[in-house]
Image (cartoon, rainbow, N blue to C red):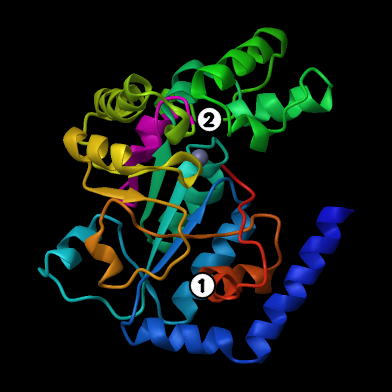
Amino acid sequence: MKQMVRNSLAELLGIWYTINGKIKKAKQRALAGEFILSIYFHAPSAALFESCVRWLLKNGFQIIPTQQLLAIKAGEIPFPKGAAIITVDDGWRTNINNIVAITKQYKVPVTIFATTEPVEKGGAYWWTYANKAKQLHLIEYSVEQLKKLDNIERLNIVNKIKATLNLQREAMYPEELQAIAESKYITVGSHTVTHPILIQCDDAEAEFEICTSKKILELLLNKPITQFAYPNGDYSSRELELLQLAGYQLAFTTKTHYLTEDVLKQQLELPRFEVWESGGYFETISRITGVWFNSKTKKNHSNGQ
Ligand SMILES: [Zn+2]
């Protein structure tokens, strides 16, 4: 009920942004080459993902592969007019039908950041265990509270839940990840091994999460992994250093800025606009054009991890 009210109000706001010309203005600025739209998803429905792709293409945008950002940054190609990049976090199994199939249909590139442990071992993502355990009154902590704990403390709680609850696989199987990585429209990047909150990890844990996930994916997919997305968007100077040492070339945060030429200089701190995956059409368009995030009056908090 609360969610329905939230979504209805958000949709009205989205409609208002359309009527008052804010979306049109943002679109014109992007088409003039002021910035690239950087958009990300977790586990959207096929209809939602397709509606975003269709809106971008219909409005004159070109969806470019994330790795092209390197050539743009290096000045090998000019800063594009009307470009968008699409990234997807976690490696959800539903992405195969809801995203990968659509990238082929529309011939658009997408980068998917996979968390390796749920791919290799199955089961659910840790926050699904935590949500379920909370519902069943097995734990007091909410997911948001768990994110604030030291990594080791959070892991102890999550591992106890895993020993009690048997939940279905949420991530792709290794073979499925291999299969999608063969598509010319899909780039796979790393989203750590266990999806921790990196800033709650000690040095050894942070290094393991950043370096080992890269090695696992490189072995599995037999190609270099050079892109990364921070779980929950959290990082510090330590993570930047670790990423650099590991040889990552691009990394994505959850900062909600436009991707301008200037912002692109920090290639391990790239911003992204999150799509609210239960939201309506006008909210979605307000988000992918960044209009949603320029208002300081609302919470920009994400519905994903
Ligand atoms: Zn994530």
Circle 1 residue: 290
Label 1 environment density (alpha carbons within 10 Å; few <14, some 14–19, many ≥20): many
* Nearest to the observer: residue 108 or residue 18: 18
Position in image of residue 122 (x %, y %): 54, 19
* Above or below, comparing residue 29 to residue 113 in the picture: below
Queried whether the magenta region covers residue 184, the answer comes back as yes
Is residue 99 left or right of 268 when viewed as pictured?
Answer: right
SS for dot 1: loop
* Above or below, comparing residue 231 to residue 139 in the picture: below
Q: Which region of the structure is painted magenta? A: 176-196
* Above or below, comparing residue 212 to residue 257 in the picture: above
Amino acid type at circle 1 is: Gly
Position in image of residue 250 (x %, y %): 26, 50
Residue depth check, mark 1 versus mark 2: number of the one nearer the observer: 1
Amino acid type at circle 2 is: Ala
Queried whether the magenta region covers residue 10, the answer comes back as no
